[in-house]
Amino acid sequence: ALNSKMAIQSGTGDRRERISITTELGLLFHLLESLSANGAAFPDAEINPCVPSNIVSSLLLLPEATNLALLDGVAGATEIAKRPEALYRFIMHYMDKEIEQSSDANSDPTSHSSLIDPIQGINFVSVIEYSTGKPKVSSSRALTVDLCYDHKLYNKAETSLNVRFGDILRFSLCKEVPLRAWCDESSSYESVIQRKIATSLPKLLSLSCCCAGKLGYKNGLQFWKQRDKRNWLPEYIEVEIALDRSVVVRELVSRDDENEEWVEFKSHPLSSSIFDNVDDGFKYPTTKKYQLDAVCSFIRNNGSESIEGHHVIHVRAPKNLECQALRRQIINLEKFIAGREIESRATEGGGKDCHMTIASRVSSSTLQQRKLKLQQQLETALRGHSEDAKERCEWLLFNGFVVTKTTHDDVRSFTANFKEPSLVLFREIDDVNTIKCPTDVRDQAYVEIPTSVMNTTSISGSSDTKHSTSNLPGKGDLVAIDAEFVCVQAEESRITSAGSKEITSQPRNSLARLSIIDCRSNIVLVDDFVFQREQVSDYLTRFSGIRESDLDPNTSPHHLVTMQEAYLKVRLLMDRGCIFVGHGLREDFRIINISVPPSQIIDTSFIYHQPNQRYISLRYLTNYVLGRDMQQEIHDSIEDARAAYDLYTKALSLRERGKFDEYLTSLYSHGHRTQFKLRVRDEENDPPVN
């Protein structure tokens, strides 16, 4: 909900400079939710992998992210094994700052000034104790804890380390480091003890393991690899800050006899002369119990010798998560089936034929079969939950695009040579015997997009768009859409030793123009050029008609808007139930970063297509079917949108007369004869359209 509100507020301030990670993440999560809910209604019942290009673009543009070298292609990029720790720390701090600034600018008195910090924030007191003179005391706050591996622990045993996780965490929350520092009172350097002690406990304890990668064993990886410690990472821990400010960590350990016991690790107390001067506003003692909720691990390619690899994530999820996803898919399928039945009855009663949407390419019987299959999967999932009612949660492994169920032993074990810890998250619980699972807050998070997003101010100073919000198209109304793109990242490749071409970096496009026409009145609802924050490597003018001056705020005569403003206009029309008509819309919606239900997509590239044949370009179809010459030098997306709508109405007319299949066959025959070269159709050799 907050992410949508921030996107709506994106018009405030300097729109050319504003980059919101929080908003982009929110839009990405909405995209993933939509893909999951509507996937079963697509013709192939499959969802293509989602590429988060917009969030990558935002990270590339942020100076803070660039300085941290978080992404590939940046000079001195962080080692891939350590990158999630740096990225997680950056995103948490940046989101917390963004939300706080957004709340300050919001006049709503109920808005929260901060969201991340109350959940993950930890207070620390830093103390430098001199042999002479008063100690120096300062305070700080952090959203993550870096695990520190005290080298004194190496000497605890000669033959084995015999160190538990609780000992590492205790030291990390109450560090003691001997060093030499300047003392003002003695005007000399002295041997001092520097302590950094946690004085508060968060609801979500985020730990950066700091030992993955090239120098892992020098940084503490050997503690995780102790083979005599089965499941060295505990599932439950308890952290206490005592009255004397000492930090106590307890972990639940499985003994050899299969019983469990709590093992305690305690730091030295802080002298009263120090903590009496620390006014942190907390009551002591304070204790919190935590359960393991997520683990991010680095998996080395080809065993322990390789420096390359990828990351996997283990997440504790409620068992009913699968049931919730299946229910949403079933509900959406039922809506599609009901809509199909209403359209069929209307057609039988002498009404117009139903729209040729993407969903209409799937027969009613196929939809019913998919619904039955989903219901069977739901029954199986529910039966499994009832048989093991005590286990409310389960562990899921996210490995690339593959998601599988796994065991808590697999999550907690790091003895394999190829597996190294990166991030660990513990969540507060009331009691070990009362397992908490993440709750579903999807219903509370929905925000209605206001119609005011259709009226935007141009960045270039050209005329503003003003639309009557009372007459916007709604449920079932057709809108023709076309989008044009520019390339912001060219394809990168290399020639292998075998002489073949290997693509090392895929090209990345960005939305540059968006045109939408209300098919009821032929009025142009949207004709926006999109301001590019990234440097454009290729304007693709021969395909898009976009020139550099069109997107420059100082020279553009067009209505220039931000990416988020263009997105919100499409999102509003989608939420209102409009049906989008266009050509090749899958790529358009992917670049816009939105997932439109298949029942709201009419794609002429699919309508004018035969199985096992090539897809036909819009320009060729316009030449052949409509008799228009689109070989003009200046490309126009409004003309493309109108052409797609006219092609659709022509297909409807042919279908009503029962001639569409015959006409499609002649279209492909003509295309094969001419090798699909562009020209206005030959009336002497080709059959008439009407």
Image (cartoon, helix red, strand yellow):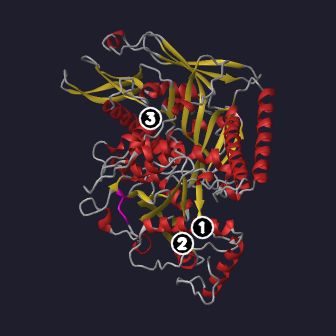
Q: Which corner quadrant of the image does residue 335 belong to?
A: top right
Residue at the location (41% across, 52% down)? 566
Give the mark nearer the N terminus: 1 vs 3.
Answer: 3
Q: Is residue 78 visible?
A: no
Q: Which mark is residue 618?
A: 2
Which residue is identified by label 1?
605
* Mark 2 vs 1: CB contact within 8 A: yes
Circle 3 or circle 2, nearest the eye: 2
Give the mark nearer the N terminus: 3 vs 2.
Answer: 3
Which residue is identified by label 3?
2
Instruction: Give me the C-alpha separation between circle 3 and circle 2.
Output: 39 Å
Give the mark nearer the N terminus: 2 vs 1.
Answer: 1
Tell me if residue 465 is in the magenta stretch. Answer: no
Query: Secondary structure under badge 3?
Result: helix
Graded by Cα atoms within 10 Å as few (under 14), some (14 to 19) or many (20 or more), the crowding at tag 1 reads some
Residue at the location (71% across, 41% down)? 330
Q: Is residue 107 visible?
A: yes
Specify whether 687 is left or right of 267. right
Residue 162 position (above or below residue 681): above
Tell me if residue 530 is in the magenta stretch. Answer: yes
Graded by Cα atoms within 10 Å as few (under 14), some (14 to 19) or many (20 or more), the crowding at tag 3 reads some
Name the amino acid, label 3.
Answer: Leu
**Residue 119 placement (x, y as % from top left):** 47, 26
- Give the residues drawn in magenta, as a range: 528-536
Name the amino acid, label 2.
Answer: Leu
Residue at the location (59% across, 87% down)? 683
Query: Secondary structure under badge 1?
Result: helix
